[in-house]
Image (cartoon, rainbow, N blue to C red):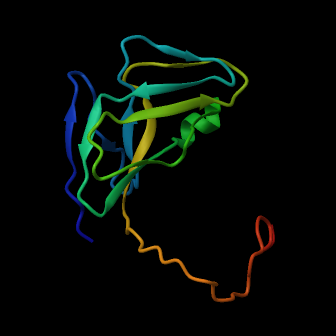
Amino acid sequence: MERPRISFVMEGGASPPHYHTSGSAGADLKAFIEKPIVLSPGERCVVPTGLRIQLPEGYEAQVRPRSGLAATCGVTCLNSPGTVDSDYRGEIRVILVNLGSDPVTISDGERIAQLVVCPVAQANFISVASLDSSERGDGGFGSTGH
């Protein structure tokens, strides 16, 4: 599978997206902030990355939490995964929330999220009088077991 080419622009001093290992699905996104941010328990904030990207049509970039921050500090991303559309040219910013019991300090250059680039398709939505039946039918949450 050929890798899509992603153009990017960084503010001075910001970090480019970086795959930590050759098998990483997500490229690290780092905080680009003037001073540390202290996230109290239950608090959320929008953290800039200083990074703007240009995705090819037919792709999106998903902003996802980092498992290390979630496991050790209780910090995760809200609106996860957040979608960066192919026609968006603004700065990628990450909504972090502290679900832990202690304050957490986010420092400049700290890895705060990961960016996963995925192909997407736009659907043709067609209004119909009824839908075909299925084994599941209209069973909602929990209807297929735990």
- Name the outermost residue toward the front: 129
Q: Is residue 70 above or below residue 110?
A: below
Name the residue at 46% across, 73% down.
125
Q: Is residue 75 above or below residue 137?
A: above
Residue 25 locus on image (x, y percent):
40, 55
The total number of labels drawn is 0
Residue 118 locus on image (x, y percent):
37, 60
Residue 77 locus on image (x, y percent):
55, 38
Tell whether 88 sits left or right of 135.
left
Tell whether 78 sits left or right of 146.
left
Q: Is residue 13 above or below residue 75?
A: above
> Where does the N terminus fall, quadrant-wise?
bottom left
Name the residue at 73% across, 24% down.
101
Tell whether 128 sits left or right of 99.
left
Residue 126 locus on image (x, y percent):
48, 78
Give the image quarter of residue 146.
bottom right
Q: Is residue 119 above or below residue 29?
A: below
Name the residue at 80% across, 72% down.
143
Name the residue at 53% across, 77% down.
127
Give the image quarter of residue 135.
bottom right
